[in-house]
Image (cartoon, grey):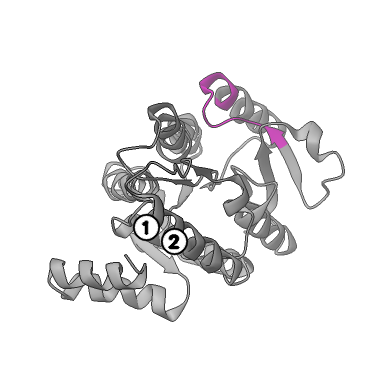
């Protein structure tokens, strides 16, 4: 069925925009979300709803609006997310809370909002966009890794809870892709007095280089499309460079300390 209704959080840029555009071209009825659609008046790739994943009332209003417009919500793609970097010791608590609100609590609130709708219509698909970073604790990205890793585990649990309702759930974990995530990422300040100054500064430069050299986000869109076409999606999907995907294989087979040493060498720590 090509005219399924798709709701994509954070759909006005980056991976969300790529997914929405690709699915629209495939014939899906796509609605993205933006905290302030007024800033996207010239946006024409697909329709945008006003929604802030950190605001429960905003979520309730937007999902109710979409159900009124289309009568159903077939696919939820939890894409909205925010980057955060910094030493664990020095990252402000309020910024940590914001990251978890966007990357974890927001997607869970979206799921809670659409599940009654999907259960009533007798079908649905939830795709959580996580990150390959969520499979490992990365230096100076601990809070990002933790929030995305938590969403991966929530996906596993949710699949089992939904098995009797004909509602599918899976995650798609991208690696580094050429998007504007680096520009919107929160960076804990690099303090001249910080004992982490040099190591953190070097890691920041490496992270930005990886994003700048990242692949086209349309690859994530293609993966999401294939997942939608799959009758029984797998628990997890990963999309990224061969090296990024191979790093997950290494993590599963190498002793912890050896894998830790590989990361230390990779980040030149």
Looking at the rendered structure, which numbered label has been put on residue 202?
2
Q: Residue furthest front?
A: 193
Q: Position of residue 51 (x, y in %)?
A: 63, 31
Q: Is residue 157 left or right of residue 177?
A: left
Q: Which of 240 and 96 is in front in this view?
A: 96
Q: Nearer the viewer, residue 228 or 241?
A: 241
Q: What range of the chain is rendered magenta?
A: 49-59
**Residue 200 lies in the magenta stretch:** no
Quadrant in which the C terminus is drawn: bottom left
Q: Which of 101 and 89 is in front in this view?
A: 89
Say which element carries label 1: helix
**Residue 55 lies in the magenta stretch:** yes
Q: Where is residue 17 in the image (x, y as percent from the top left)?
A: 68, 54
| Contact (Cβ within 8 Å) of mark 2 with mark 1 | yes
Q: Which residue is drawn at 60% across and 67% down?
A: 212
Q: Residue at x 37, y 67 (%)?
A: 267
Looking at the rendered structure, which numbered label has been put on residue 199?
1
Crowd tier of the residue under label 1, counting other residues whose Cα lies within 10 Å: few below 14, some 14–19, many 20 or above = some
Q: In this view, does 36 lie to the left or right of 152?
A: right
Crowd tier of the residue under label 2, counting other residues whose Cα lies within 10 Å: few below 14, some 14–19, many 20 or above = few
- Please identify the quarter of the rendering in which residue 2 is found: bottom right
Q: Where is residue 27 in the image (x, y as percent from the top left)?
A: 72, 60
Q: Which residue lies furthest to the right in this view?
A: 42
Q: Is residue 81 left or right of residue 165?
A: right
Q: Residue furthest top?
A: 57
Q: Residue at x 32, y 47 (%)?
A: 195
């Amino acid at each position: 069925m090509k005219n399924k209704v798709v709701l994509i959080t954070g759909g006005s840029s980056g991976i969300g925009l790529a997914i929405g555009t690709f699915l629209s071209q495939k014939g899906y009825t796509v609605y993205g979300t933006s905290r302030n659609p007024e800033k996207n008046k010239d946006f024409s790739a697909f329709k945008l709803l006003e929604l802030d994943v950190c605001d429960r009332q905003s979520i309730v209003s937007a999902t109710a609006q979409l159900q009124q417009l289309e009568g159903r919500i077939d696919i939820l793609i939890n894409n909205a997310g925010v980057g955060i970097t910094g030493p664990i010791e020095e990252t402000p608590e309020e910024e940590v809370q914001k990251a978890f609100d966007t990357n974890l609590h927001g997607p869970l609130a979206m799921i809670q909002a659409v599940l009654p709708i999907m259960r009533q219509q007798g079908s649905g698909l939830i795709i959580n966009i996580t990150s390959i970073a969520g499979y490992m604790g990365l230096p100076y990205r601990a809070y990002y890794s933790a929030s995305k890793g938590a969403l991966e585990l929530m996906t596993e649990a949710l699949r089992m809870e939904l098995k009797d309702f004909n509602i599918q759930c899976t995650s798609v974990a991208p690696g580094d892709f050429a998007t504007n995530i680096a520009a919107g990422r929160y960076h804990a300040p690099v303090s001249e007095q910080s004992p982490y100054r040099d190591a953190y500064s070097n890691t920041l430069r490496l992270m930005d280089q990886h994003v700048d050299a990242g692949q086209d986000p349309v690859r994530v869109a293609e993966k999401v499309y294939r997942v939608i076409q799959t009758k029984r999606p797998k628990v997890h999907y990963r999309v990224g460079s061969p090296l990024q995907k191979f790093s997950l294989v290494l993590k599963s087979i190498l002793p912890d300390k050896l894998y830790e040493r590989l990361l230390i060498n990779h980040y030149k720590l």
